[in-house]
Image (cartoon, rainbow, N blue to C red):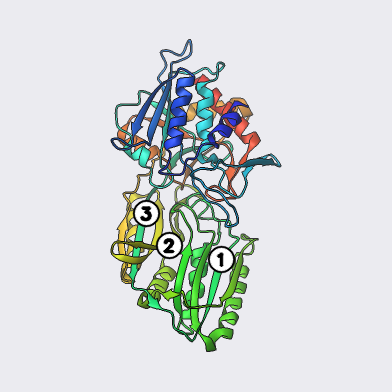
Amino acid sequence: MKVFDIFAEINKVPRPSKHEEKMCEWLIAFAEKHNLEHEFLPVEPGAKTGNIIIRKPATPGYENHPGVVLQGHIDMVCEKNNDTVHDFMTDPIQTYIEDGWMHAKGTTLGADDGIGVAMALAVLTSPEAKHPALECLFTVDEETGLTGANCMPAGHLKGTRLINLDNEDDGQICMGCAGGVGTLAKFRYTPEPAPKDYFAAEIKVGGLMGGHSGEDIHKGRGNANKILVRLLYTLMNHTDLRLAAIDGGNLRNAIAREASATVLVPMSFKENLRVLFNLHVAAIENEIRDVEKDFCMTLNSLTSLESLTTLGSITPSLIRALYACPHGVFAMSRDIPGLVQTSTNLASVKMREDAQGKYIEVNTSQRSSFESEKHSLKEMVGCVFALGGAEVENTEGYPGWQPNPSSELLKTTVEAWKQNEGKDPLVVAIHAGLECGLFLEKYPGLDMVSFGPWMTGVHSPAEKLNIESTHRTYRWLLKTLEML
């Protein structure tokens, strides 16, 4: 299938968010190879990354029909298992097929949204496809800031109907999505020498599923940051806990799968540390055993304190703030059964340093179908960190996409699925963020839908793509374009 051939080529090209230069070059070369008109729109003057539009005229008989935009993003979430050696800036994604699914070897697969990009490119090069004038819009940095969609200038798209190819459920049409914003906290500290008569140990949390902070936030999966901090809080209430290091999670839009901390406790508390650790692990296993089959937690002693420094006086405030920080579903929709309305994700905790000194950076994200509730939750999370003495700032965020059940494009897409598959598709709004809301700001008249093939484990090394669903979805795209 041409879609998978193109996807294989895409996965040879490094494309982390904010580092899509090589993918931009590859797309331009693709357009030139196939004699297709193309346009490069840098995210800022002189930038090597930017949105790319590739255009193809209407096929005979479709010249007078309104144009269609096929849209996907070219960056990917770069997550790998701790025991996987892989450089996302240089190494190709290694894939394999098992039981009808495509997987990557120890890393994210990049089907989000590489397979959507591959479908659009397959249509552009298909001699059999029937369609109105096509514009394929490929955006950058969707995963960490929606920069490409945000920077998309008005006046460049001529099509009045847009199909976003960044959905993850088989036979599902999305007609709306949540908006989002990020809240960042910085806990500044002055390192202090480790006390000499203390016992040091490294605590690790792992084996969690993680996943997309929009699509998977309601599934009861463990957050490694919350699990770790819960133990740290318990230890702090029982002894003079010193914290030498802390690290957890990676990306703002991914649920934290792994976390670790280096702790110091008085030597006399050594045995109690092990007891409290075992009690904590047993409690967590009991709470999440139905969801997290591979959860594990380890405690390993360190033989030397010579190279260790501690976070000093901020330790209690940091632990309390992280413990108090909400995570998970905040509200469910009263209008659409089963839809998460508002949520927040405690995404990552990292040790950083800048010109002002050392600090702990905490990254969170908030999502909601209501702008007012999104901003209220953002302020709530910010207040938790401010009470802990942190510097707090917010990302610019992005708007939601309000559903339009009367959409003509939606009606055509539904009918195309019914003709292909003999049954109705599922029409939904989703809690994940899509770029569609930002496009509406620049192009208010756009009629939009979103669909894509079945994927699971997105934003984690467990990401996988269903082969047969990809075939169905591509046939669906071709049928929709033919009917338009």
Q: How many marks?
A: 3
Query: x, y (%) of residue 56?
Result: 44, 19
Q: Report the amino acid beneath label 2.
A: Lys
Q: Is residue 377 visible?
A: no
Mark 3 vs mark 2: which is more N-terminal?
3
Q: Secondary structure at mark 2?
A: strand
In the displayed orientation, state which residue is furthest to the top: 60
In the displayed orientation, state which residue is furthest to the right: 99
Query: x, y (%) of residue 359?
Result: 35, 66
Q: Which residue lies at the image location 54% right of the left edge and 71% below the top edge?
A: 203
Q: Report the amino acid beneath label 1.
A: Val
Q: Quadrant of residue 170?
A: top right
Q: Which residue lies at the image location 43% right of the left edge and 39% below the top edge?
A: 20
Q: CA distance from mark 3 to mark 1?
A: 24 Å
Q: Is residue 279 above or below residue 19?
A: below
Q: Report the amino acid beneath label 3.
A: Gly
Q: CA distance from mark 2 to mark 1?
A: 15 Å
Q: Which residue lies at the image location 47% right of the left edge and 77% below the top edge?
A: 306
